[in-house]
Amino acid sequence: MSEKRIDTVEKGNYYLVNGLNMYYEIHGIGKPLILIHGAFGSIKTNFGNILPTFAENRQVIAVEMQGHGHTADIDRPLSHEQLADDVAALLRYLNIDNADIYGYSLGGDVTIQLAMRYPDLVRKIVFSGGPSYHPDGFYTEFLESDKMMRPGKPWKDYYDSIAPNPSDLPIVAQKIKEMTHAWKGVPNADLKSLKAPALLIIGDSDIVSLDHVVEMFKILGGGVPGDLVGIPNSQLAVLPGTTHASLLKRSDWLISMIMEFLDAPMPK
């Protein structure tokens, strides 16, 4: 991993990338860890409980994507690929040449795209909250639920308090819905070709079926007898009694598992 450090701690910065005035925060000093929120999320609502602990030993760079948090929407559709391109451009600007990436929900999909499109930028990846590589993995009830396609009240209230244009929320919600239903997934061969070790974290009552995540884990090299062949590069964690939303509250579990995974030596 890059040992390059940013010597000053900055907060509340913007960078114009691909026509988007993208908001980001930098906390702490150390090896870079990038945090990417989920749909309707923000740095505070998705990572507020865990960011301070990560920043004790890491240079945490947390972003807010198009139409989320402090970053205004612009006249272009949302796509996992475009959002990954935006994050990559920001990392280039910050002179981050190799980093660990942690994405929640939609942020996990963007993390997968980053690892595929910019392998030189990515060391290890963590995908928590509904890890998926194909739309068939989602529960039908999730895809058909309007409730899941709009933010809950606490998130909406926070969005209204910080967004440059709060009235854009219905437009952003429609773009998220269109992106979700248009997503074709990641081909098995592309997923299998990923070089970055991955940690998949899912709640046992998440928005994606456990069978689907286990299959994703196997494609990434998991599901083997470790005592005979060694621990695979990728890992899987299933959190008991945990939904998609409540996973964000499992701070102690997340911190312990994620830091152990990231701090372990890279496989040879």
Image: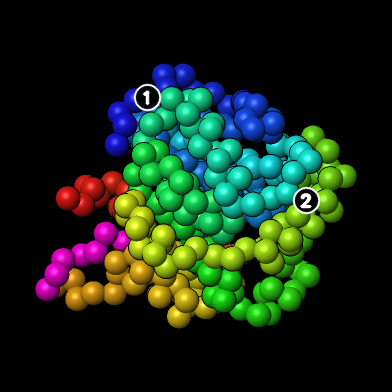
> In the shown orientation, is residue 69 left or right of residue 6?
right
x then y, percent, for residue 105: 56, 59
Q: Which residue is mark 1?
A: 5
Q: How far is the residue under mark 2 from the one under mark 1? A: 35 Å
Q: For this rendering, which residue is in front, 210 or 8? A: 210
| Colour pattern | rainbow
- Per the rendering, the mark at residue 172 is 2
- Three-letter residue code for mark 2: Val
Above or below: residue 254 compared with residue 262: below
Q: Residue 104's image quarter?
A: bottom right
Q: Is tag 2's residue or tag 1's residue first in the polypeptide sequence?
A: 1
Q: Residue at point 74% right, 62% down? A: 177
Query: Magenta residues?
Result: 228-234
- Indicate the secondary structure of the residue bearing disc 2: helix
Type of amino acid at the residue the image marks with label 1: Arg
Residue found 54% across the figure and 65% down from its top: 185
